[in-house]
Amino acid sequence: MFYDYHVHSNFSPDSKTSMTKMIETGINLGLKEICFTDHMDYDINQTDKFVLNYKDYLYTLELMQNKYKDKIKIKKGIELGLQPHLIDRYSNEMKNNQFDFIICSQHAIDKNDLYYDEYFKDKTQQKSYEIYYKTFYDIVKNFDDYSVLGHLDLIKRYGPYENSLGDSLFMDIIEAILKEVISKNKGIEINTSCFRYELPDLTPSRRIISLYKDLGGEIITTGSDAHCPSFIACKFDYIQSYLKDMGFKYICTFDNLKPNFIKL
Ligand SMILES: [Zn+2]
Ligand SMILES: [Zn+2]
């Protein structure tokens, strides 16, 4: 059984696919649940489009839940683009809107979208990564209104470099992030977009997943980060057996921000 907990629709400006199309593809694939996590990103210099209208979005999701209630469970999720100065704003907004599931992602630093090279200018590659992880630590230390961390080592995907840097240089700070996540009963996601970007490792890396396990982490969701139908539940069969082989017993789904543990 598959549960895709990271799916976008055209409520996100970087997707052209309607919710209906994503849902019907999910039904055809036999998914048990699909959780929409459209983007909410304030304060990114390169764009001002990633601002979601909560009311329209939640209203549409409720219509879809009703329409498809006999075929698939549809969950109300969101992917927040965190930056330290947005913590209070997001906290308030998450308390005033009813979501099932909230992904805490970092897409921009100092308002610079990591997708573009501006952030990496005037920094070494190592420094760029260090700031990314330290800022993530800052965020998880001070922000509680989320369910899982999104694509934890996303930084490896970006910057004007031939290769990404391995985890060894940053293990201390990554460990501190994971400890904070675990102590607050939050989780991480396995983001299978790594397959469509043809990355050499998973997202987050096998090493980070293994550290999460060693530290006692149990809350894991599976998300394709699909922005179009063809990537829904991408490689979930592989990921589920990989997690099982590693000794994880469950993957999680969420209702009203509370995790349900589904046996692998
Ligand atoms: Zn993201
Ligand atoms: Zn996403």
Image: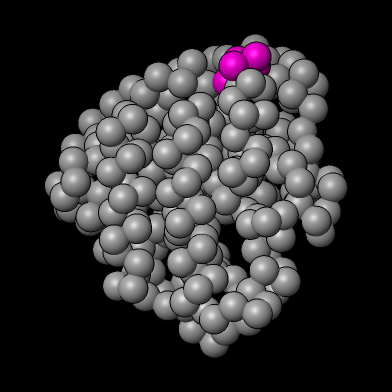
Q: In the image shown, does 92 or 85 lie closer to the viewer?
A: 85
In the displayed image of the protein, which residue is found farthest to the bottom?
Answer: 162
Residue 151 percent coordinates (x, y) = 48, 53
- Name, please, the residue furthest toward the right: 48
Q: Which residue is drawn at 38% across and 43% down?
A: 188
Residue placed at 71% from the left, 33% from the top?
19
- Which residue is nearer to you in this view: 135 or 247? 135
Q: Quadrant of the image for the C terminus?
A: top left
Q: Which colour scheme is used?
A: one colour
Q: Where is residue 105 in the image (x, y as percent from the top left)?
A: 55, 46
- Camera-side residue of 34 and 44: 44
Residue 36 horizontal side relative to residue 180, left or right: right
Asked where in the image residue 157 lies, by quadrant, the reply is bottom right
Residue 194 visible here: no
Q: Specify whether residue 41 is in view.
A: yes
Left or right: 44, with 143 as reference point: right
> Is residue 97 on the magenta stretch?
yes
Given residues 136 and 98, the one toward you in this image is 136
Q: Position of residue 199 (x, y in %)?
A: 47, 72
Q: In this view, does 157 lie to the left or right of 171?
A: right
- Say above or below: 228 vs 95: below
Coordinates of residue 123 in the picture (x, y in percent):
59, 78
Q: In which quarter of the image is residue 165?
A: bottom left
Magenta residue check for 10 = no
Q: Residue at x 18, y 41 (%)?
A: 216
* Left/right of residue 180 with respect to residue 158 in the rendered view: left
Q: Quadrant of the N terminus?
A: top left
As drawn, 83 above or below 95:
below
* Relative height, residue 85 to residue 56 (above, below): below
Stretch of the chain drawn in magenta = 95-99
Residue depicted at x 36% and y 48%: 177
Q: What main secondary structure does the magenta stretch of the protein show?
A: loop
